[in-house]
Amino acid sequence: MRLPAPEPAAAIAPDHRPASLPAAPLETAAPKRDARSAPGRERRSREDLMSSKPVAILLAGLAGGAADILTAFVIYRPATPAVILQSVASGWLGKASFKGGLQAAALGLVSHFAIAVIFAAIFVLAAGQAPVLLKKPLIAGPVFGICVYGIMNAIVVPLSNAPERHAPTAVMLGLGLLAHVLFGLALAFTASRMLGGKA
């Protein structure tokens, strides 16, 4: 009587092993971490927001407007800040602005910063065509400020309701130019920092 031949090794199932040997533990892939953590994403979102053109225009306008009006408060003393702001509002209200109290001064303040933001938009849009404006803010800013001074005194003020003024003395002309140089410098420097030197 012949014994049955043993099965070939290849026919044995791969997972056939003695019961005494434990099954090898299954390897599970470790969960992948997001390359960008939540704080990193938030920081990136803030950076993207701060580098956007609308935000850059707004902050550059506020910086330039603040530099200009604070300089005016100093160089036009003993006139009070309220009177200086009323003179800005006189572009809308004429001579009545100087009798308008704090309301007229508030109108002048809002108008001043609105004009500053408009010029900041012009600067940033121009920098899109000429990136050197953002790369060289210490040069472009003062030049832009002087151009703004010319535009305001040659076009904007004469077309407004502001009372007619006498021709400025050499000293007042120099002080006015200084205020606008600081305006342009603060505006251009802020825009350059916000946009990373490129528009």
Image (cartoon, helix red, strand yellow):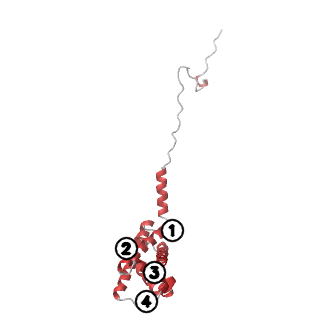
Gap between marks 4 and 2, in whole Å? 32 Å
Q: Nearer the viewer, residue 12 or 106?
A: 106
Q: Mark 1 belongs to which amino acid?
A: Pro
* Identity of the residue furthest to the left in this view: 171
Could you tell me residue 96's position as x and y percent?
49, 85
Q: Secondary structure at mark 2?
A: helix
Residue drawn at (46%, 56%), measured in percent from left and top?
A: 43
Q: Quadrant of residue 144?
A: bottom left
* Identity of the residue furthest to the right in this view: 1
Q: Which residue is mark 4?
A: 165
Please report whichever mark, 4 or 2, sits nearer to the chain's N-terminal start.
2
Q: Is residue 199 visible?
A: no
Label 1, residues with CA under 10 Å away: few <14, some 14-19, many ≥20: some
Q: Which residue is mark 1?
A: 54
Q: Mark 3 belongs to which amino acid?
A: Gln
Q: Nearer the viewer, residue 125 or 15?
A: 125
Label 4 close to label 2 by CB (< 8 Å): no
Image side of residue 180 versus residue 128, left or right = left
Q: Which residue is mark 2?
A: 138
Please report whichever mark, 1 or 2, sits nearer to the chain's N-terminal start.
1
Q: Quadrant of residue 81?
A: bottom left
Q: Which residue is mark 3?
A: 86
Gap between marks 1 and 2, in whole Å? 22 Å
Gap between marks 1 and 3, in whole Å? 29 Å
Q: Mark 4 belongs to which amino acid?
A: Arg
Q: Nearer the viewer, residue 137 or 3?
A: 137
Residue drawn at (54%, 32%), measured in percent from left and top?
A: 26
Gap between marks 2 and 3, in whole Å? 31 Å
Q: Is residue 59 visible?
A: yes
Q: Mark 2 belongs to which amino acid?
A: Leu
Q: Secondary structure at mark 4?
A: loop
